[in-house]
Amino acid sequence: MSERAPTLVLDRASVAYGDVPVLEELNGVVHEGEAVALIGPNGAGKSTFIKALLGLVPVVRGRIEVLGRPPAQARRDVAYVPQADTLDPDFPVSVEQVVMMGRYRRIGWLRRPSADDRAEVADALERVGLAGRARDRFGTLSGGQRQRVLLARAIAAKPRMLLLDEPFNGVDAVSQHALLEAIGSLKAQGASVVVSTHDLAIAHLACDEVCLLNRSQFGFGPTGDVLTPERLRATYGGHALELRGDRVIVTQT
């Protein structure tokens, strides 16, 4: 049994929008310094899972505990990285200003950033490989670079838990490597990570555990134990599976 404290506890949890259940019977535990991959087809409820951890979708049965508290009460210590294409690239804001937003919960909206805040922003940009782009307008960056800026914003917030929604979609190899390095660094500092992804290779590279989702849970546990062809077929409802060495590639049709 891990000696590290649990940061996420799912105990027969079900979440719903109004009277419509979206995810049911979620069970599992994530500890400090661990990462869990959320894997399942489009529409499986992965984004809803992340919203539930932020306290934005109600738990209607069972229990979800984040950092020892109900999700809404833990939000101050949780950072969320959305998909980069959900943001307006034409918004006139610099890379540095975007990352500084991660400090606002600590400094307040009306106070000026301190030298320490600016140092944290610079460090976060260094960790995602964008130290030289601080003054650039956010919208001029590539999609992968924008995703790295959003991760830097999360790093600057000093979270105990990091939530990422499809962070590797459409990013180049350089950005993928920078994202993986930054996630590994956060884990080493004791933060836990929840990442939604379709890429099973990413789950193997970055995550200790996997949660298979498709409206309900089809598996939760160590990556090597859960990512089996049988469990994936059940999760994806019979969509095509292709084996490549020790990797399972899921083709959605």
Image (tube, rainbow, N blue to C red):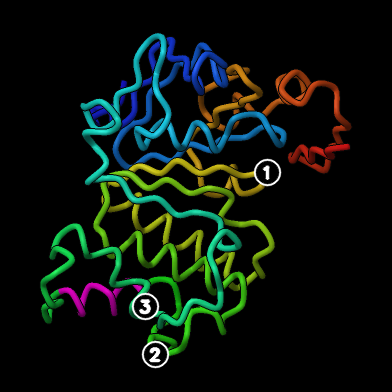
Q: Give percent across and percent down for residue 159.
A: 27, 51
| Image position of 84 with respect to 212: above or below | below
Q: Depth check: give the residue in front, 168 or 6.
A: 168
Disc number for residue 135: 2
In-image side of 83 versus 199 (left or right): left
The amino acid on which the numbered mark 3 sits, given as a three-letter code, is: Glu
Report how far apart the C-alphas of labels 1 and 2 lie in the structure: 33 Å
The amino acid on which the numbered mark 2 sits, given as a three-letter code, is: Arg
Report how far apart the C-alphas of labels 3 and 2 lie in the structure: 14 Å
Disc 1 or 2, which lies upstream in sequence?
2
Q: Residues within 10 Å of mark 2 (few under 14, many from 20)?
A: few
SS at mark 1?
A: loop
Residue drawn at 59 percent across, 70 percent down:
144
Depth check, mark 1 against mark 2: the one in front is 2
- Contact (CB < 8 A) between labels 3 and 2? no
Residue drawn at 80 percent across, 21 percent down:
237
SS at mark 3?
A: helix
In-image side of 205 versus 130 (left or right): right
Report how far apart the C-alphas of labels 3 and 1 lie in the structure: 27 Å
Quickly name the residue at label 3: 126
